[in-house]
Image: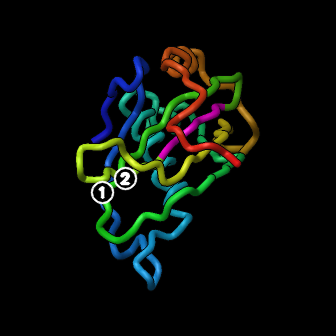
Amino acid sequence: MIRDVELGGMAFFQSSHVVEHVDTDDSGVMHFSRFLSLVETATLRGFHELGCGIAHMRAQKKDLVVSEAHTRYYVPAKFLDRLEVVVHMEHVGAAQLRIAGAVSRDKGDGDRPVLLARTNLVLGLVDADTGRASVIPPRVKAVLAAVPERSVLGDAKDD
């Protein structure tokens, strides 16, 4: 279940995931593509919780599309690991949204979680009938713009 949580004074969307067999390769390591999928799913669930999810967009004949994605991997996830996915809004533009997400694993000893990957997404809004870029409806933009911004997640350094 997605919920707003306070981390460092900022509101975030957060969800949990246990790595399943279907998420992994033959060696039990979670496939790299799943990190992006988990961040995208947490983002869409967060939008739903805010009242501007996929169903709301479809009712307005709009679709959200991923126009750019970048993931930086630090540590692999393995079968049965308990993951936390945190996403936040980086930018709300006229027709695009920039989302930053992080996937971490709890060490299980009450210590600080281990950052596994960071993902940045650029989402665009398009007209559902034509596929052309569309502006974000004013109500949706206001709701999303009210989500606090934060530029960095976790302590891992990009080399």
- Measure how far apart labels 2 and 1 are at the Cα level: 6 Å
Q: Position of residue 40 (x, y in %)?
A: 51, 48
Question: Where, by quadrant of the figure, is residue 93 drawn?
Answer: top right
Residue of label 1: 82
Q: What colouring does the structure picture have?
A: rainbow
Q: Position of residue 131 (x, y in %)?
A: 72, 45
At x 56%, y 44%, the residue is 156
Residue numbers of the magenta segment: 97-102
Q: Name the residue at the left extreme.
A: 109
> Is residue 20 shown above or below 69?
below
At x 63%, y 23%, the residue is 92
> Is residue 119 shown above or below 12?
below
Task: Between residue 62 and residue 98, name the one nearer to us.
Answer: 98
Circles 2 and 1: CB distance less than 8 Å?
A: yes
Residue of label 2: 105
Magenta stretch prevailing secondary structure: strand
